[in-house]
Amino acid sequence: MNHQPTPETLAAKVLVRGIHLELTEALRQAATEKASRLLRHNSHIVRIRIDLELDRSKAVGEQFIAKGHIEIGGPDLIASATTEDGYKSLDQLIDKLD
């Protein structure tokens, strides 16, 4: 059974934020679509927060850090992934949370 969440459900349950970067509409949409994959697993998910951070420190160059936080009935699930590309970081983060 392929249960796709409605746009209203996605808007209520998925929060996407940019830290030290302006999220483009394409990046925001990609993050929301990828996070919707997680909602099919568990109807007990209260909220999914995804933070995409751009780290421009001299030591590491330019790195995108995707952090995910899933609020559920029990202990929250938290993961992160860091790469040189925002979309790649999102993919790795969603795979970890999945």
Image (spheres, rainbow, N blue to C red):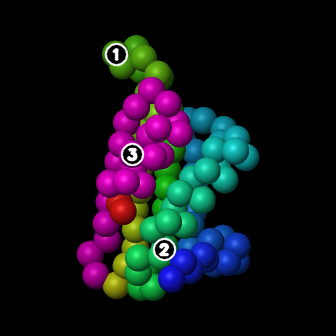
Q: Nearer the viewer, mark 1 or mark 2?
A: 2
Q: Nearer the viewer, residue 88 or 53?
A: 88
Q: Quadrant of residue 21?
A: top right
Q: Residue furthest front?
A: 1
Verify whether residue 85 appears in magenta: yes
Q: Which numbered disc, 1 or 3, marks the residue that appears first in the sequence?
A: 1
Q: How far apart are labels 2 and 3 at the CA level?
A: 17 Å
The type of residue carrying mark 2 is Leu
Q: Quadrant of residue 94?
A: bottom left
- Residue stretch rendered in magenta on the structure: 74-96
Tell me the element at label 3.
Answer: helix
Q: Nearer the viewer, residue 16 or 39?
A: 39
Q: Which residue is mark 3?
A: 92
State the residue at coordinates (58%, 45%). 18
State the residue at coordinates (40%, 31%). 83
Marker disc for residue 93? none
Marker disc for residue 59? 1
Visible residue check, residue 17: yes
Q: Tell me residue 20's x, y (percent).
A: 56, 35
Q: Quadrant of the C terminus?
A: bottom left
Give the answer, above or below, for where 17 lies relative to 97.
above
The type of residue carrying mark 3 is Gln
Tell me the element at label 2.
Answer: helix
Q: How far apart are labels 1 and 3 at the CA level?
A: 22 Å
Marker disc for residue 39? 2
Q: How far apart are labels 1 and 2 at the CA level?
A: 37 Å
